[in-house]
Amino acid sequence: MKKNIKFVQGNEACVEAALYAGLDFFAGYPITPSTEIAEHLAYRLPRVGGKFIQMEDEIASMCAIIGASLTGNKVMTATSGPGFSLMQEALGYAIMTEIPCVIVNVQRGGPSTGLPTHMSQGDVNQVRWGTHGDHAIIALSASNHQDVFAMTVDAFNLAETYRTPVVLLFDEVIGHMRERLFMPEKGEIPLVKRLRTSVKEGVDYHPYLPREDGRLPMSDFGGVHRYNVTGLFHDMWGFPSDNQKVVHELLRHLVDKINNNVDQITKFKEFYLESAETILISYGSSARSSLHVVENLRSRGEQIGLLELQTLWPFPSHIIKEKCAKAKYVIVVEMNMGQIHQSVRGAVDRPERVFLANRIDGVFITPMDIRNVMRLIQGKGV
Amino acid sequence: MLNSLLRAIEKLGLSKNEIVMVSGIGCSSRISGYVDFHTLHTIHGRALAFATGVKLSRPELNLIVPMGDGDALAIGGNHFIHAARRNIDITAIVMNNRIYGMTGGQYSPLSGYGTLATTAPYTNIDQDFDVVELSIASGASFVARTTTYHVQQMADIIRKAILHKGFSVVEILSQCPTYFGRKNKAGNAVDMLESYKTNTTSIGSKAKKENPELIERGIFAQKEIPEYCNEYNKIIKKAMKGHS
């Protein structure tokens, strides 16, 4: 048992999980605070026969993993804000062509070069709408190393299940902090294998013809079936089409395959929500300070709870609405200017009761910061 | 160009399943949709980055990346020099028509000083790249130039480029009578093809010595240096040895 405990950075926990999930191929570019992910994988991947490549920029990194995924590999890249901005066009290509891949964004302060070595949760809405055009995306978050591990594996599983890019968001605090990690045994967390076509060689394979359940079996690119892949709207053969029906149905498919499965995709944690009059909603590292506040005040008899979001997109509106139905106050705790706060306000019946407790100065939000906001809301002064 | 490429592939005896064609965006990039290989039509300028992912994950495949001059050397210039530097076994074909055709005739990094384009209505003051010199300086281990007039040479060069183990660049001077030709009074397609015959010559020919203005055709570089995927396989062996 002892050998299964590690004391690692969040970035290392992510690496361990990616290897656990069967990562075959990583392409990346150095950027603080995600660089350790690339460094560890440069060392670890070839040991298991996998491949690591340092590309010339983040655009190329994103493109390379898409190419490698298409040939039948589990792939990942890791970056931070500026690099994530550069990846947006290729991210849209992966959405359009339905190529599974995992993108880790260890957030730092922005905009622009911002605060490279400080923390922020400012990329939440960029993940949702960073690439152009209508689309749906899956984005996950984690507040501790055990969850980084679990959510990284989940990211790979969701990418394969829905044939889509999945973004894993954590932040500088989680990425660089060292914490205990229990390494799960092999088989302890289920892994989703790529759904491959049963169509035999020599028989027509339609890369973009969904099965009855909406899933599209893949055929390893460069293998026995030849087909076209394009970022243009395309028909079931993968060839470009501007036929109105084809365009309409493809866009609906890309959005519906994710948005119609919110319940299957969504993961969250709840702490003391029953009978809670005040509900904190948080995610990532700020959920740690939130939990601290909740446990402290519960011990003094206050009716307070925490809803920790692990799936940020698709936004689990109905869960938020349901959990917050009876709360007097809902306080969103995050380290940006209210990116999830806006979505929570849109989800609940009484948005006037939703408040924001945030920090945007590159300093980790403390329990005291949250308490001060609560005192203001409750009219007690700071 | 497509014709010569297909002839080269036929001569090599490659099966369709062994060939992956990756293209970007532009007139030239639509070529991937016309062939029965594994075809990946990607985003503007990034074809070589996608191709790197495909090749490194499946080194046994033959990667052919047709690009236009803007696709390869403006938006894709960084990927071009770095793929060359790595010497990854990919055949890059630059169809150089000195113009952005799909968007209607804007100047490219290969248009050259003094040309006219819709975005250079007074005259182009941008100097151009020499694709051959750039490729050699970037580390490409096979570098050649030909034209759409010299179809036999083109097929022969493409065949050698595919056979070459490493990063190969084949620059093909190609006519765009619609935009470059019209703007620059270079005549129709036939006139432009004719100009490739009269304005080019074999590398180191007597004609070149007499007229240094002539553009040379042929293979400028062909060297054996470590290929990226081969080298990475050695890394895997080294890492696994250290692990056991």
Image: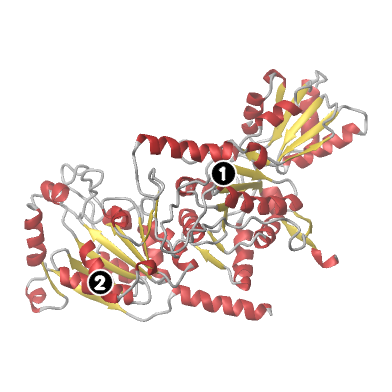
Residue A135 visible, this orientation: no
Query: What amino acid is found at the position of numbered circle 1 in the picture?
Result: Asp
* Quadrant in which the N terminus of chain A appears: bottom right
- Chain letter for the residue marked with disc 2 in the picture: B
A337 is higher (above) or lower (below) than B135: above
Are labels 2 and 1 assigned to the same chain?
A: no
Name the front one of labels 2 and 1: 1
Query: How far from the left and from the top, in percent, is residue A335?
Result: 67, 37
- Residues B69 and B12: in front is B12
- Residues A348 and A195: in front is A195
Query: How far from the left and from the top, in percent, is residue B111?
Result: 20, 54
Residue count near mark 1 (Cα–Cα under 10 Å), binned few <14, some 14–19, many ≥20: few
A380 is higher (above) or lower (below) than B229: above
- Residues A103 and A234: in front is A234
Query: How far from the left and from the top, in percent, is residue B163?
Result: 32, 76
Query: What amino acid is found at the position of numbered circle 2 in the picture?
Result: Ala
Q: Mark 1 points at which residue?
A: A213
Q: How far apart are marks 2 and 1 (CA)?
A: 44 Å
Residue count near mark 2 (Cα–Cα under 10 Å), binned few <14, some 14–19, many ≥20: many
Q: Mark 2 points at which residue?
A: B8
SS class of the residue under badge 2? helix
- Residues A239 and A67: in front is A239
B24 is higher (above) or lower (below) than A3: above
Residue B169 visible, this orientation: yes
Q: In which quarter of the image is residue A319?
A: top right
Q: Residue at point 80% right, 64% down?
A: A4
Q: Residue at point 54% right, 37% down?
A: A256
Could you tell whether B115 is left or right of A207 in the image? left
Q: Quadrant of residue A188?
A: bottom right
